[in-house]
């Protein structure tokens, strides 16, 4: 049985955070484990409150996993502050975990900040050099690279800048692209750029898409897939989750985590 660990915040609404991660792990048939970094009061309308864990509490959760069960891959999501980022990074090194997926969660769909701005430098200094893959959306990539991203050329430049920070693979997601027909994700391995495209769906129900995508990548890495294969399958997974709408809540609703399995969906790949 392959195992995957999520180190992230909790979403009481169930659409993002560890709830989305664990649902995704289950759907992709890996055993999911978690270490909570924060508890949020959250729904489709936004984030009403954030209650961060202490760094010690986060460390104890990770140690409970590392000292007994171990993990084949892990992802980080909402880490909230610099102290948590640094301590998580130290524990990743302690246990020698290599399949590390970093989803640099910064802003919730409703606009609430989920990462203190002073933590950006800690993310770049401590965590990104340990990651197998980093999966920012365009606004997150702009913050991490201190540049505007408007074109494919800009995406490539941003990917190179992130790679230069020590990341082994960069995926800049295309959900915020101005292209109204397609969503194009860009993968960079330090030598080659690969794009993954899918039909853009007109919907407001995209809460948790970043968490779900990175969790799917993590699950596939845990099962031994290559980075290319993991990203390709994750792209298919999130496309199905967006297309098969659930219509929950009055705001940005969650995606459908069981859509991929129920549809036995086969679709986009790299090109």
Image (cartoon, rainbow, N blue to C red):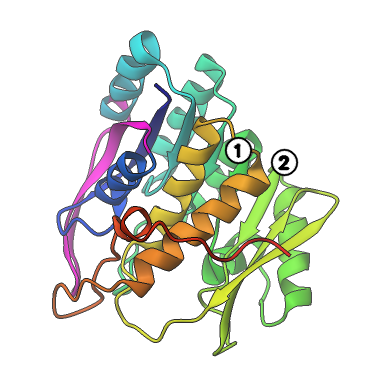
Residue 131 bears which disc, if any? Answer: 1
Q: Position of residue 69 (x, y in %)?
A: 36, 14
Does residue 93 sit above or below 76 in this rendering? above
Task: Judge whether residue 19 can be spotted in this image.
Answer: yes
Residue under the point 60% across and 59% down: 144
Does residue 9 sit above or below 42 in this rendering? above
Secondary structure at badge 1 equals loop
**Residue nearest the viewer, comparing 253 with 9:** 253
Residue 62 counted in the magenta span: no
**Residue nearest the viewer, comparing 104 with 231:** 231
Q: Where is residue 121 in the image (x, y as percent from the top left)?
A: 57, 49
Residue under the point 33% across and 61% down: 208
The nearer-to-camera label among 2 and 1 is 1
Task: Please name the residue that numbered disc 2 is placed on.
Answer: 166
What range of the chain is rendered magenta?
29-56
Q: Position of residue 12 (x, y in %)?
A: 15, 54
Task: Judge whether residue 116 can be spotted in this image.
Answer: no
Mark 2 or mark 1: whose residue is earlier in sequence: 1
Q: Does the CB distance between marks 2 and 1 fall below 8 Å?
A: yes
């Amino acid at each position: 049985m392959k195992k995957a660990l999520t180190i992230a915040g909790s979403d009481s609404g169930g659409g993002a955070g560890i709830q989305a991660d664990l649902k995704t792990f289950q759907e992709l048939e890996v055993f999911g484990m978690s270490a909570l970094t924060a508890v949020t009061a959250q729904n489709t309308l936004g984030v009403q409150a954030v209650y961060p864990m202490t760094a010690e509490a986060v460390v104890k959760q990770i140690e409970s996993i590392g000292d007994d069960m171990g993990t084949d891959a892990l992802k980080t999501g909402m880490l909230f502050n610099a102290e948590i980022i640094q301590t998580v990074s130290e524990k990743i090194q302690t246990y020698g975990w290599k399949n590390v997926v970093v989803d640099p969660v910064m802003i919730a769909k409703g606009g609430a900040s989920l990462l203190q701005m002073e933590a950006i430098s800690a993310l770049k200094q401590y965590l990104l050099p340990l990651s197998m893959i980093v999966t920012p959306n365009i606004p997150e990539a702009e913050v991490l690279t201190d540049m505007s991203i408007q074109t494919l050329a800009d995406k490539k430049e941003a990917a190179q800048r992130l790679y230069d920070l020590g990341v082994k693979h960069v995926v800049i997601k295309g959900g915020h692209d101005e292209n109204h027909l397609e969503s194009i994700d860009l993968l960079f391995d330090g030598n080659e750029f690969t794009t993954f495209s899918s039909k853009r769906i007109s919907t407001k129900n995209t809460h948790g898409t970043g968490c779900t995508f990175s969790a799917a990548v993590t699950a596939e890495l845990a099962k031994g897939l290559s980075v290319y294969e993991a990203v390709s399958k994750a792209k298919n997974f999130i496309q199905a989750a967006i297309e098969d709408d659930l219509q929950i809540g009055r705001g940005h609703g969650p995606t459908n985590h069981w859509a991929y399995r129920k549809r036995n969906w086969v679709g986009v790949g790299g090109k």
